[in-house]
Image (cartoon, rainbow, N blue to C red):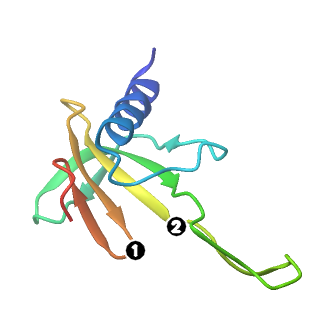
Amino acid sequence: MNIKEQVIQNLKNWLTKTKVISYDERIPLNCWDKELKDLRDGTVKEVYIVSFKTKSTTIEYNEKGEVVSFFEGMYCFAYFDAETLEFLYIMKKAGYIEVDGSY
């Protein structure tokens, strides 16, 4: 298993274990090449970033059973330390999710 596959598997394990946020299994998780990024704590570090999409959550139907409203899932980005492969946090549209599952 190469590093990118290992990082993706670590994220899948974390998502399954914590059940804090879901991901759409039909859309593959994508791990980018390691890159130097400014992290939210102000440090600069080499990281791997895994992008994934959450499951679509709300589908509304009219009285005829036709779909009238559909809210698609959002893209999220999981950050991993490139040296240690330690999971750092998930960045999403409405903030961050910590390793312990808190927002």
Residue 78 coordinates in the image, percent (x, y): 35, 50
Write the residue at 24% across / 32% down: 85
Which label sits on residue 41? Answer: none
Residue with the mark numbered 1: 93
Label number found at residue 74:
2
Direction from residue 31 to residue 94 in the image, left or right? left
For disc 2, the neighbor class at 10 Å (few under 14, some 14 to 19, many from 20) is some
Query: Which residue occupies 17% across, 66% down?
Result: 40
Amino acid type, residue under disc 1 in the picture: Lys
The reply to whether discs 1 and 2 touch (Cβ–Cβ < 8 Å) is yes
Q: Residue 62, percent across and down?
A: 80, 85
Residue in the foreground of this view, choosing between 65 and 79: 65
View extreme (right): residue: 64
Can you say which quadrant of the picture contains the N terminus? top left
Give above or below for 62 relative to 53.
below
Q: Secondary structure at mark 2?
A: loop
